[in-house]
Image (cartoon, helix red, strand yellow):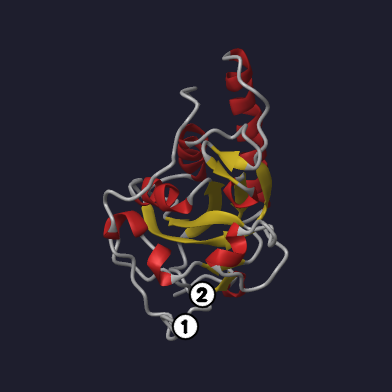
Amino acid sequence: MYKTLIDSSLFIAAEDRSDPQKTAKHRVLQESIYPPFPDHQHFAIFAMGCFWGAERRFWQQPGVQVTAVGYAGGHTTKPSYEEVCTGLTGHTESVLVVFDPAQTSFADLLQVFWQSHDPTQGMRQGNDIGSQYRSAIYCMDQQQLQEAQASCVHYQARLTAAGCAEITTEIALAPVFYYAEAMHQQYLDKNPSGYCGLRGTGVVY
């Protein structure tokens, strides 16, 4: 059985035509990266800088069933990597995280999110500069949205106590997620020594 809660129309395959039948499996988790997803699973979309390292961080988490990288939160349709990198499409480099709520919680994933990058940097992460590198949480439903907003308030208090700046993370209901090209999916499994720009603040959630 497959859930109607996850609206498959939110997920658009890449335009490079590398997988026209949408059959690609996750290189590590061995599950399809495309919907429909089993009916007990939930999803969220996270943006925290370059999506290569962010995807690896999430596929390593217990209870995560599959991950994929893509583009979300912009104002154009079917963007390419090159177009997103111009900053003109408004998309973030994002990670789709599909998880089993019986094995992990959205709260657990939020903790990973907040501690794995610096959410105070605006349109950048470290040396990666541009709107595609901004911090964002895109939520499956209103319950997740409220939980994400509350987690932001909580972590801001932690950051403020540590003398850090204000959080700039965008928090919203999930927009359309455009899958990135095949070369970017599970990039750091294909290229273990590849670039990973993840840097947290050092402040515990």
* Residue placed most toward the observer, 193 or 160: 193
Crowd tier of the residue under label 1, counting other residues whose Cα lies within 10 Å: few below 14, some 14–19, many 20 or above: few
The residue furthest right is 75
- The amino acid at mark 2 is Ala
- The amino acid at mark 1 is Arg
Which residue was labeled with disc 1?
17
* Residue drawn at (52%, 70%) of the image: 3
* Residue placed most toward the observer, 47 or 38: 47
Crowd tier of the residue under label 2, counting other residues whose Cα lies within 10 Å: few below 14, some 14–19, many 20 or above: many
State which quadrant residue 66 falls in.
bottom left
Residue 165 screen position, x and y as percent: 65, 23
Q: Indicate the quadrant containing the N terminus: top left, top right, bottom left or bottom right.
A: bottom left
In the figure, 18 relative to 183: above or below?
Answer: below
Residue 126 screen position, x and y as percent: 52, 36
* Residue drawn at (67%, 72%) of the image: 77
Tag 1's secondary structure?
loop
Which residue was labeled with disc 2?
14
Residue 85 screen position, x and y as percent: 58, 58
Q: Is residue 198 left or right of residue 140?
A: left
The residue furthest bottom is 21
Q: Is there CB contact under 8 Å for labels 1 and 2? A: yes
* Residue drawn at (33%, 65%) of the image: 26
* Residue placed most toward the observer, 165 or 99: 165
Residue 59 screen position, x and y as percent: 36, 52
